[in-house]
Amino acid sequence: MAGHEFLKSIEVNYKKAVECLQKTEGKEIYSDELGSQIMTANSTYVVRFGVRLRGTIHTFTGYRSVHSDHFEPVKGGIRYDIEVNQDEVEALAALMTYKCSLVEVPFGGSKGGLEINIRDWKEEELERITRRFTQELAKRDLIHPSQNVPAPDVGTGEREMAWMADEYRKLNPTDLNAWACVTGKPVSKGGIGGRTEATGRGVQYALRAFFDQPNDVKKTGLTPGLRGKRVIIQGLGNVGYHAALFLSNEDGCLITHVIERDGSVVNQKGVNIQELREYIFKNGGVKGYEGFVEKGAEILEEDADILIPAAMELVINKGNAEKIKTPLIIEAANGPVSSEADDILVKKGVVIIPDLYANAGGVTVSYFEWIKNLSRIRLGRLQRRAQENQTTLMIEALEKMIGSKFPDEYKDQVMRGSAEIDLVRSGLEDTMRNTYQVISDVWNNNPNAYDLRTSAMMVAVKRVMDSYNSLGL
């Protein structure tokens, strides 16, 4: 089962990190016993509930796993997929623990799922199902602004989060922080600007941070800079679309291959991502688009500079790892490279920017949204006009001093104060850049850290273990 293999891969990576920490800082500090306790999920709640739909009762199975509550609330998305299972949810919850720790977001790790094919149900039916699921989670405080905060994942989005938040609010009408019970909501319902694009934007910032380190880039054999780099992207969902859009429009990358469910699009001069996305929405897939080929996973093995798996876990495994040609992989999805494939790729010299760092943009901006909900004020509301007034005064003084006008093409941009989305992007970029610097330092200076994944896991696990040690465990 894929979920079991996914969980095993995360446990393998975790054990590697613990072993490296023991070699570096001593087994008496980072013991096997503490390591085993942290690796295991604290709890998993399985719920089965009925909903009367289309004249009969349909039973659904849902999950919510809490991996670690060394920080509360715990945080993690809820995915709607017919293949969801307990092992997969527990693996994703563990990954959330390490991800939050790595980017220093004060949450523990959690994850949820509902076994459902969303294409089988109308919107109003999905709303009823989601509200019933929310009721079941609320009974056990598995949705709660100070204990467990869900977010969107595969098969869910702003719509489902709005339904969940509204249902929680109805169940807790006197809770002032009710809207903070989930993140990823529409801006009109307490969401935050930039949350929808956050994971894809984080992938962009992660690549920029990587290419700012000449020693790290040198290990791939690639030339400096992102401009002109050929990119294969697997999955043009929310994460893949935004990553591809920003990399092509803002960094000059060429998206040469796009892999989707019904085939792929290949264009060595660069695929127009916005145009392709609109075509997919209109036609339900990429079939018939210019450059369409009836190939799927085989495209992962094509020649390019950067490979971005942005869909589901384990798409790169021991069966195809040896055939991967790209010197750089960045994991936009959770767990797209199995532990066995990871070993093969590292031995080949492929550099992998790991998921627990690369796709942490979502949880980082979720943290900003949660803070916004608790403070009940839009980011930038207090200081934006003060910034504009101060900058305007400085420009007027400068023009008076030098006797010349400030260039009009820059004036409006300089004078504009920071809106919420500007602050969100700034905070996300700062997080991704600072985090990569920490990971890179470990990779380049610790002989036990032989790749980026191990380096990132060492940083994350050390922080979790130190947190538990401070609690007396």
Image (cartoon, rainbow, N blue to C red):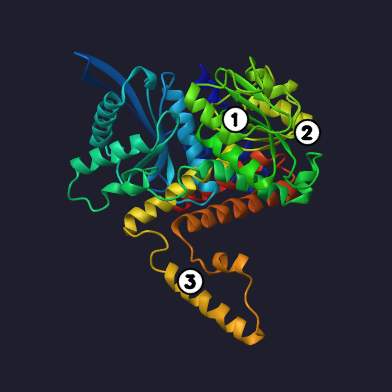
Local packing at callout 1 (Cα closer than 10 Å; few below 14, some 14-19, many 20+) is: some
Nearer the observer: mark 3 or 2; the answer is: 3
Residue at the location (72% across, 40% down)? 450
Residue, far bottom:
401
* Label 1, label 3: how far apart the Cα atoms are: 52 Å
Q: Which residue is mark 2?
A: 349
Local packing at callout 3 (Cα closer than 10 Å; few below 14, some 14-19, many 20+) is: some
In this rendering, the answer to whether 401 lies above or below 160 is: below
Amino acid type at circle 1 is Val
Query: Element type at marker 3?
Result: helix
Q: Position of residue 254 (x, y in %)?
A: 70, 37
Q: Earlier in the sequence, mark 1 or mark 3?
A: 1
Query: Element type at marker 1?
Result: helix
Q: Is residue 46 left or right of residue 409?
A: left
Nearer the observer: mark 1 or 3; the answer is: 3
Amino acid type at circle 3 is Glu
Q: Which residue is mark 1?
A: 12
Q: Which residue is mark 3?
A: 388
Q: Is residue 148 visible?
A: yes
Residue at the location (78% across, 50% down)? 214
Amino acid type at circle 2 is Gly
* Label 3, label 2: how far apart the Cα atoms are: 49 Å
Q: Position of residue 261 (x, y in %)?
A: 55, 20
Q: Quadrant of residue 231?
A: top right
Q: Quadrant of residue 317?
A: top right
Q: Which one is nearer the viewer's eye here, 121 or 437?
A: 121
Residue at the location (74% across, 48% down)? 444
